Image (cartoon, rainbow, N blue to C red):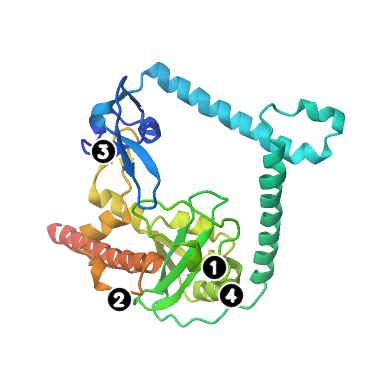
Amino acid sequence: MNLFLQEEEVDSYMEKTANQWKKLGFVLKDGVTGVERTQQFGSKYTYYTENDVRPLTEEEKLQLKEKAREERRLHRILLKAYKDYERFPEDLKVDLPLYFNEQFYKNRYLPFKEKQKEVKGLIEKALQKEAVPCSNPSHMIVIDIETTGYEYRDDVLQVSVIDGDGRILLNSYVKPYYKSYWHPEAGISYISPEKVADAPELHELIPQLKGILDSCDTVIGYNTGFVISFLNFLDYSGKKEEDVMEDFAPIYGEWLPSFEAHKWQTLGTCADYYGFDWNSMEDYVSGSLRDCYAILHCYRCMKKQMKTMMNMHKWEK
């Protein structure tokens, strides 16, 4: 599978940073300056269009892959060094990797690992509590979250769940475990640290989440795997998982030859495709709750569309 886009696949309206272009298989041409843009909360980035870049050569692609492989290797060495550090006799600490940062290790890495251990204990204890009963005649749920980022060390900031009839089963901000500040991303509903300062921590919502899962047979989301990765302590066994994002991709039909697959579209694109009115909701509906209603709308439209297509197919036969 080719991990890079071909030149003919580049959208003529694409505007990306140098790193974003590189991930797609393009590099800046000599002498280009780009356009500096200031994001909503003051961060500045330089963006480039398709006229500012050229495809990576095969040799450059190989160099990038080798560099990524080497970075992963060094990362593994560094993690091992972190784990072994306290066991190293003083006379052997000179053999630690040159890029080993003792200050970072003591001030950042160790506190993070200790916090991870604490959080694991809180979650395990909360999982022992009885589930809060949940009435859900639809036997399906739509779930979405807002987070500080996309990696394992990021936090959940909001959890929202509605049933198949659009009734709110849970909508709560979440106080983060690890982060006191997170970078706001353009186009994503920004949840400030002040909004979540007095919110419950994620483990406090577990009894309610358990009851909600017990009430349903089907879990619906948009990029459902991402949501579940942040709530992976829950038991999803026996539940049917529906990912609207994956189902919508072939309907929208944007094909990426390099990946030999349909491109996954944003929730905004899917909602617009099915005519969802983002302004139809009350002012209090925001963030992941707002997205839940958009997901449910798209899910219903998609099922209706598929049913119509099946009936037409039967009629043709």
Q: Residue 14 — which label?
A: 3
Q: Is residue 85 left or right of residue 125?
A: right
Comparing labels 2 and 4, the label whose residue is closer to the camera: 2
Task: Name the residue nearer the viewer: 137 or 133.
Answer: 133
Q: Residue 277 — which label?
A: none
Write the residue at 46% across / 62% down: 192
Residue 48 % position (x, y): 29, 33
Q: Residue 197 — which label?
A: 1
Residue 138 % position (x, y): 39, 77
Residue 137 % position (x, y): 41, 81
Indicate which disc, 2 or 4, sits on the residue closer to the N terminus.
4
What is the three-letter code of the residue carrying label 4?
A: Pro
Write the residue at 26% across / 40% down: 255
Mark 4–mark 3 CB contact (< 8 Å): no
Q: CA distance from mark 2 to mark 4?
A: 28 Å
Q: Quadrant of residue 139?
A: bottom left
Comparing labels 4 and 3, the label whose residue is closer to the camera: 3
Q: Residue 282 — which label?
A: 2
Q: Is residue 6 left or right of residue 222?
A: left
The residue that label 4 is drawn on is 207
Q: CA distance from mark 1 to mark 4?
A: 21 Å
Comparing labels 1 and 4, the label whose residue is closer to the camera: 1
Q: Quadrant of the C terminus?
A: bottom left
In the image, residue 110 sits, relative to residue 274, either above or below, namely above
Residue 239 shows up from this direction: no
What is the three-letter code of the residue carrying label 1?
A: Ala
Indicate which disc, 1 or 2, sits on the residue closer to the N terminus.
1
What is the three-letter code of the residue carrying label 3?
A: Met
Write the residue at 30% across / 21% down: 31
Indicate which disc, 3 or 2, sits on the residue closer to the N terminus.
3
